[in-house]
């Protein structure tokens, strides 16, 4: 019997995998797809068991850099306790430019191969501006006559996802 197999019965699955296969670094938590309204704070989780290599985040294939403060990204900070393997990416005041794919990467070390998390998508939602109703036949002030038909359009700019607008007739 494999000596590691006996030990695996008494340990967690992640620890078991690292002992039997000689890997020291494994993810406890990986980032997941999420969405946020523009202007809020977002936290993307990354926790690593047995971390020995450098940890960094990647946005749309661009390495954001190692360390807790990320030069060039003043709204981004890596939070958590390195000794406990916690490397969460916190983004303050999320903007449309943060709508992207993210990965947590742990570099290889003498003890372990490098690992890359699942890709997680951050979807930034933007509330629509106040809806505007326009009459197509004139550019003047709207003066409606009862019983006459009018062609109207309504739009709400700058929303993500696109606004869904429904006209309703009131009987009042």
Image (tube, grey):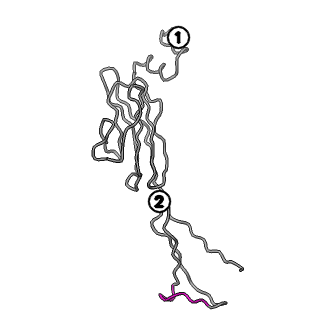
> x%, y% of residue 146?
66, 90
> Which quadrant would the C terminus be assigned to in this image?
bottom right
> x%, y% of residue 62?
31, 45
Q: Do the residues bearing badges 1 and 2 touch, measured as CB atoms within 8 Å?
A: no
Quarter location, residue 78: top left
Marks 1 and 2, how far apart at CA: 53 Å
Say which residue appears at 56% left-offset and 84% top-offset: 151
> x%, y% of residue 157?
46, 69
**Closer to us: mark 1 or mark 2?**
2
Circle 1 residues within 10 Å: few <14, some 14–19, many ≥20: few
Say which residue appears at 43% left-offset and 25% top-offset: 49
Sequence-wise, which precedes: disc 1 or disc 2? 1
Count every numbered label the image shows and give the total.
2
Q: In the rendering, which numbered label is found on residue 29?
A: none
Image height of 11 relative to 36, above or below: above
Q: In the rendering, which numbered label is found on residue 126?
A: 2
Q: What kind of element bears circle 2? A: loop
Q: Which residues are magenta?
A: 136-144
Query: Closer to the camera, 21 or 32?
Result: 32
Say which residue appears at 40% left-offset and 36% top-offset: 79
Circle 2 residues within 10 Å: few <14, some 14–19, many ≥20: some
Say which residue appears at 54% left-offset and 14% top-offset: 10
Residue at mark 1:
6
- The rendered magenta stretch, by its main secondary structure, is classed as loop
Extreme-left residue of the structure = 71
Asked whether 142 falls inside the magenta stretch, the response is yes
Query: Closer to the camera, 166 or 19?
Result: 166
> x%, y% of residue 30?
46, 36
Q: What kind of element bears circle 1? A: helix
């Amino acid at each position: 019997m494999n000596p590691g197999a006996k030990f695996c019965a008494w340990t967690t699955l992640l620890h078991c995998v690292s002992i039997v296969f000689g890997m020291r670094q494994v993810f406890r938590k990986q980032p997941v797809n999420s969405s946020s309204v523009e202007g809020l704070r977002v936290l993307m989780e990354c926790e690593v068991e047995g971390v020995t290599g450098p940890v960094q985040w990647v946005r749309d294939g661009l390495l954001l850099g190692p360390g807790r403060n990320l030069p060039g990204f003043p709204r981004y900070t890596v939070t958590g306790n390195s000794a406990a393997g916690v490397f969460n990416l916190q983004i303050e005041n999320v903007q449309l430019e943060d709508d992207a794919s993210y990965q947590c990467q742990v570099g290889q070390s003498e003890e372990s191969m490098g690992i890359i998390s699942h890709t997680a998508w951050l979807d930034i939602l933007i509330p629509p501006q106040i809806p505007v109703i326009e009459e197509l036949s004139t550019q003047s002030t709207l003066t409606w006559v009862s019983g006459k038909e009018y062609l109207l359009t309504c739009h709400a700019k700058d929303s993500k996802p696109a606004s869904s607008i429904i006209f309703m007739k009131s009987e009042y």
